[in-house]
Image (cartoon, rainbow, N blue to C red):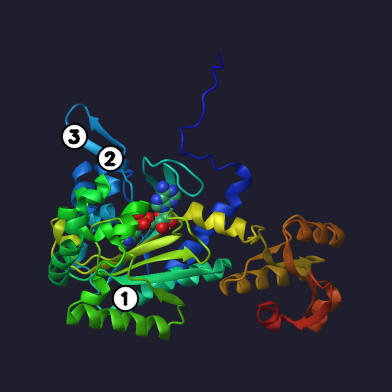
Amino acid sequence: MSNKIFAPKGTNDILPEKIALWEKIESQAKNIAARYGFKQIRTPEFESTNLFERGVGDTTDIVQKEMYTFTHKGKESLTLKPEGTAPVVRSFIENGMASAAQPVKLFYLTNCFRCENPQKGRYRQFHQFGIEVFGAEDASSDAEVISLAYEFLRELGIKDVIAKVNSVGCPTCRKAYYEKLKAFIAPKLDKLCDDCKNRFDKNPMRLIDCKVETCKEHIEGAPLMLDELCTDCKDHFEKVKTYLDCMGVEYEVDPKIVRGLDYYTNTAFEFIPKDSTKSQAAIAAGGRYNGLVETLGGPKTAGIGLAMGIERILIQLEEQGIEIDTEEYTDLYIAPLGEGAKEIALKYSTLLRREGITVLTDVMNRSLKAQMKYADKINAKFVAMVGEDEADKGVFLVRDMNTKEQTEVPFDKLAEFIK
Ligand code: HAM
């Protein structure tokens, strides 16, 4: 019998050759989050179990079937975080962020743990890039959140992913809708699966997206929340669509997007590959959760956010044959020859670094040939050579390392030339 130990089912090692790619995705995530004004937050890997029971909802698959829960020293029930939103809301409340300038915009890159049946794109430990906005009720905030995901995927070069948007209403219009929906379903209830039967009373909207074929047949033609919205919710949804158009986000309205977590109100959305028929295909998903902060004991605060599965993004990159450039480049290498030229190189490397340009120069007294070799090694895009002649003329001889073209550039025009 083999005594080998394997990684637990549904987990993956991220091997050294993949680290550059992961880091690139993470740094692009941080970069876009910063451009939209989000600040990073890191919450613990485990939380009190009742945070998820109350936050995510005790009728959801996550809470009923998928949590890694353990009892600490026979007393406290703790759970590895299955998602990032409830922990961020807990932290928002606990750290008094409701009294900070609103909106509070937070992002995270986190591990998540769900005890699901593993398959491609569905793991027991996976990674999310998520954003949460607190204190903004306006539809422009919904559009901004959706636009961030849209732009992120666009910047990565991922194509043929569509944002499917819907409104799941507010507690008021939902109450009236549930009556209608239940009246439609009640005569067929005994033909539905056990999950549907359980959800009938507690969370009937989830019946709309049951994946069991026989349930789908019985539910066909059921009333949809989108047709039953109250005036305020309808108005909010119309504005979300208008603002998405303004921001150039391609989307489709899909009244069957109801989401598997309980906290959503109004806008709910998923980013799904256009040709996908798989139920587990969402690359990113999220929505508004105007009641969640209060549910978890905080002051009434509007909220909206989304999370993207990093593994699912990587699968899209691979399937679409998109090569992400993970090579490190140096914007400029200044190659001085001689003592006078060295002073010029030091002066201009400082000035250009102040302008945000990555500059390396010689600190080894190397020959020009050795410096050019080094510039190649560090993937310099440009090399600015300066010897006695150039120093007299007040120019650098700049070599574009890609085209090999050489141009004389006045000292004070160097930044402009290479930008
Ligand atoms: P979610 O739809 O449960 O929403 O997950 C968001 C994304 O995480 C999914 O679209 C998918 O890309 C990825 N994901 C989920 N489960 C797995 C898995 N087992 N393996 C791999 N990837 C997975 C949430 O988690 C909400 N907290 C999103 C949100 C933030 N809503 C508002 N703010």
| Rendered position, 89 above or below 233 | above
312 or 304, which is in the foreground?
Answer: 312
- Real-space Cα distance between discs 3 and 2? 10 Å
- Real-space Cα distance between discs 2 and 1? 31 Å
43 or 210, which is in the foreground?
Answer: 210
| Rendered position, 323 above or below 190 | below
Please state if 198 lies on the left or on the right of 241 as rendered. left
Q: Which residue is mark 3?
A: 76
414 or 200, which is in the foreground?
Answer: 200
The 10 Å Cα crowd at callout 1, few under 14, some 14 to 19, many 20 or more, is many
| Rendered position, 281 above or below 242 | above
Q: Amino acid at mark 2?
A: Thr
Q: Which residue is mark 1?
A: 141
Residue 109 visible? The answer is: no
Task: Identify the residue at horizontal 36%, vertical 85% (top origin).
Answer: 242
Q: Which residue is mark 2?
A: 79
Q: Position of residue 21 (x, y in %)?
A: 59, 54
